[in-house]
């Protein structure tokens, strides 16, 4: 079995009803990301940030995994497969995937900015809710914001530099360091494949255009021999 790294973005969960960021009706056309997705925004107005993520958490908990999540969950059971996602939803896990690496954090988790304690986020988080461990707070969604370092970078870079195949699914490839993983893969001679609604600009050996639920299951079936 080839060593495969799959990087996914918001397009993977779009057909489950969760918004993307930079499409015509994307989240960043409705919200100022500086206000809701930066540490500075959280310091200025934590209630606004909690409202933003409380709404997204409610959407996530009401959503269901789609056929692309289910296909990747099947793939994740094969040896040598690493699923990395920029997404903060838990739809891959709810589809049965194991070992998913969330480089931008997880909406399902809360973080204490004072002591680093993490716990399952309640449906509604508020600025005055104390940390269950230290009570000092402030508590925030366990999300990596613009300007912050993503999680698990050493693990991700090790997997990408050992990959035989790097696959990008449903991401515009505009935010670093995730946007640079394809170059890292090419530098070590890995084959690169993009599965996206539209190709994101010629950086991949192969591009298969289509919605995630159309193109991902077929590709996974080819890889696992179930085609
Ligand atoms: P960046 O390239 O992501 O953004 C550069 C700056 O431009 C940031 O300050 C950001 O606020 C702003 N920006 C980015 N896209 C924008 C847009 N579409 N419209 C308006 N302003 C925009 O570089 P960065 O700030 O160093 O962020 C990269 C780090 O932040 C990485 O670690 C990444 O994983 C993380 N990140 C997390 C989120 C999130 O919402 N969880 C979003 C983006 C980046
Ligand atoms: N199937 C497949 N791809 C889709 C679908 C779909 N049904 N719908 C949209 N897409 C594609 C778009 O063509 C686009 O390439 O998904 C991508 C969405 O891009 P973005 O909105 O930029 O989302 P993403 O790439 O995940 O953003 C990266 O930016 O703001 C940060 O932290 C945030 O993790 C996010 C990061």
Image: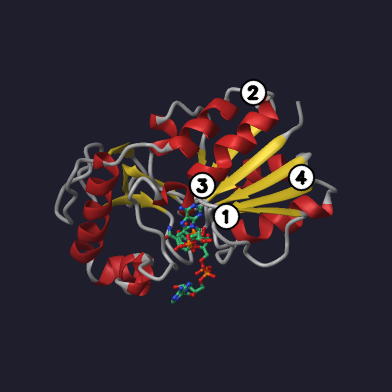
Which one is closest to the eye, mark 1 or mark 4?
1
Q: Residues within 10 Å of mark 1 (few under 14, many from 20)?
A: many
User: Which numbered circle lies on residue 226?
Assistant: 2
Asked whether mark 1 and ligand 2 are closer than 8 Å, the reply comes as yes
Q: Are marks 3 and 4 in contact (CB under 8 Å)?
A: no
Q: Quadrant of the N terminus?
A: top right
Q: Residues within 10 Å of mark 3 (few under 14, many from 20)?
A: many
Looking at the image, is mark 3 or mark 4 earlier in the sequence?
4
Nearest the camera: 204 or 154?
Answer: 204
Mark 1 sits on what residue? 196
Q: Determine the secondary structure under disc 1.
A: strand
Which one is closest to the eye, mark 2 or mark 4?
2
Residue at 27% from the left image edge and 53% from the top image edge: 56
In space, the residues marked 2 and 4 are separated at their CA atoms by 27 Å
In space, the residues marked 3 and 1 are separated at their CA atoms by 7 Å
Position of residue 138 measured from the top left corner of the image (x, y, whole percent): 25, 54
Splitting the image into 4 quarters, where does residue 219 fall? top right
Asked whether mark 3 and ligand 2 are closer than 8 Å, the reply comes as yes
In space, the residues marked 1 and 4 are separated at their CA atoms by 23 Å
User: Which numbered circle lies on residue 212?
Assistant: 3
Q: Quadrant of the C terminus?
A: top right
User: Which numbered circle lies on residue 161?
Assistant: 4
């Amino acid at each position: 079995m080839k060593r495969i790294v799959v990087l996914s973005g918001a397009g993977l969960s779009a057909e489950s009803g969760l918004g993307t960021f930079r499409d015509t009706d994307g989240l960043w056309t409705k919200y100022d990301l500086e206000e809701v997705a930066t540490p500075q925004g959280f310091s200025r107005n934590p209630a606004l940030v909690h409202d933003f993520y409380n709404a997204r958490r409610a959407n996530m908990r009401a959503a269901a995994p789609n056929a692309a999540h289910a296909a990747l969950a099947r793939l994740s059971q094969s040896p040598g497969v690493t699923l990395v996602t920029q997404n903060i939803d838990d739809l891959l896990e709810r589809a049965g995937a194991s070992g998913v690496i969330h480089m931008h954090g997880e909406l399902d988790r809360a973080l204490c900015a004072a002591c680093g304690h993490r716990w399952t986020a309640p449906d509604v988080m508020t600025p005055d809710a104390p940390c269950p461990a230290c009570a000092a707070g402030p508590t925030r969604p366990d999300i990596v914001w613009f300007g912050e370092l993503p999680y698990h970078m050493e693990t991700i870079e090790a997997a990408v530099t050992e990959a035989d195949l790097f696959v990008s699914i449903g991401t515009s490839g505009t935010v670093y360091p995730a946007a640079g993983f394809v170059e890292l893969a090419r530098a070590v001679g890995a084959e690169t494949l993009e599965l996206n609604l539209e190709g994101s600009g010629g950086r991949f050996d192969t591009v298969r255009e289509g919605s995630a639920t159309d193109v991902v299951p077929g590709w996974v079936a080819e890889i696992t021999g179930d085609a």
